[in-house]
Amino acid sequence: MSRLLVIGCGGVAQVAIQKCAQNSKVFTEMCLASRTVSKCDALKDKLKEQGSPVQITTATVNADDTADVVKLIKEYKPDAVLNVALPYQDLTIMDACLECKVDYIDTANYEPEDTDEPVWRAAYEKRCKEKGFTAYFDYSYQWAYMDKFKEAGITGLLGTGFDPGVTSVFVAYAKKHYFDKIDTVDILDCNGGDHGYAFATNFNPEINLREVSANGSYWEDGHWVETKPMEIKREYDFPEVGQKDMYLLHHEEIEALGRNFPEIKRIRFFMTFGQSYLDHMRCLEDVGMLSTTPIKFEGKEIVPIQFLKALLPDPASLGPRTVGKTNIGCIIRGTKDGQEKVIYIYNVCDHQECYKELGSQAISYTTGVPAMIGTALVLTGQWKKPGVYTTDEFDPDPYMEMLNEFGLPWVVDENPVEVG
Ligand code: NDP
């Protein structure tokens, strides 16, 4: 029996909410709250028509405003809050959870909406120098809540999507069952799906394009090595998808894994991109459309990347037209009983199967399912631990079992081809 408040009702949220409804032994009551409440109402109606036993209410909330979130939490009295809005709202929602002593779960690392804000900018410049990577997001802001969450006796589960989320659980599972010591981890994110558009993003365009157009970086021998955007390219033949080009990116789970598994000598993250995506992105960047700095246009202030988001297809609308599969996982090298070994733990997910089941494409699906799983493990007490933690810091076994049960079965290949 539990009451969950879900904030956000976009592509990822719609999967997470429908998966919570499939797990109605754990999720008995839910409040769906977002900026645009009509999306919450439509999903509530869909679940009701399907005969879901979950008691669902809806609400409007401005998650940029801590007081507004506190008000809603006090009214609804949830046992936990699942944040599937945007990374911009992580800290306001964490503050509200702290004030109300309610557990907090999210799928993405905090980053500010306005990267020119002077106080944030100064801290960012300092961090770039000290840590050696220039991504707009890092864990310091959320890890700073550790003592406050401990004192309040509440759990903060950070980044329970696929990557980060499942990928970090894969590493914890490998360490528990396959290795005495891990030496290297390559996280591979392959989307072999085709939506038929020359250019579209599979999740929130603003967050996606910020991430992909930034410098890459990887963790080696206890420090960051930064690269230019798309500087490191590899080809890989993905099981069930085929040969793809992939590029090294900075990614948030590298930071958490580097801290929590100091034995790992090198951690890299690669994502596949087609040439059309890269050409469009470069062109948009060259003309300034990826900028987060507001400009004046005909007397109004607009943020170029937000205007671009309004022009691009809504990721939640890609479901019916996307065909193909994703393959996401971790190639892990290390030693067991003195012997060197390598494994590839991965999941393959089919876009059309996801659409048939929940009306969504596989990127939202592969993020929304783990969001439900992490939330269920916190609510049932299996992953309840006061403080703030990433998914690699808990027992991976119940999470791995639930991946199999709720639509993301995984495979362990004990003889994989490695990335050069
Ligand atoms: P969408 O843009 O589709 O959805 C975001 C939702 O949040 C929308 O419903 C939006 O409302 C709502 N929202 C935005 N701002 C506010 C606000 N101030 N107050 C209340 N609601 C708000 O994004 P996605 O579903 O694609 O992504 C959701 C999250 O998942 C993001 O944080 C993203 O980074 C993360 N993600 C994580 C992945 C992982 O593997 N870990 C992979 C993919 C995504 P409205 O409808 O009004 O716009």
Image (cartoon, rainbow, N blue to C red):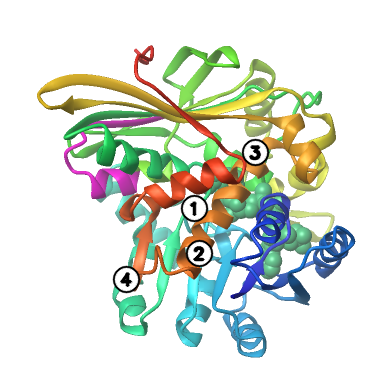
Task: Give, as a three-letter code, the residue at label 3.
Answer: Ile
Mark 1 or mark 3: whose residue is earlier in sequence: 1
Distance CA(mark 4)–CA(mark 1): 17 Å
Q: Which residue is label 3 attached to?
A: 363
Task: Give, as a three-letter code, the residue at label 1.
Answer: Thr
Which of the labelled discs sits on residue 146, or is there none?
Answer: 4
- Residue located 64% across and 38% down the image: 363
Point out the stretch of residues depicted in magenta.
Answer: 255-269
**Badge 1 local density, few (<14 within 10 Å), some, or many (20+)?**
many
Q: For the residue with label 1, is its CB less than 8 Å from the closest atom of ligand 1?
A: yes
Q: Is residue 339 magenta?
A: no
The answer to whether the residue labelled 1 contacts the one labelled 2, judged by CB atoms less than 8 Å apart, is yes
The answer to whether the residue labelled 3 contacts the one labelled 2, judged by CB atoms less than 8 Å apart, is no
Q: Residue furthest left?
A: 338
Q: Is residue 185 above or below residue 52?
A: above
Q: For the residue with label 3, is its CB less than 8 Å from the closest atom of ligand 1?
A: yes
Q: Which residue is label 2 attached to?
A: 105
- Circle 2: element type: strand
Task: Give, as a three-letter code, the residue at label 2.
Answer: Ile
Q: Which residue is label 1 attached to?
A: 160
Residue 137 image position (x, y, % from top left): 44, 51
Task: Give, as a three-letter code, the residue at label 4.
Answer: Met
Distance CA(mark 3)–CA(mark 4): 30 Å
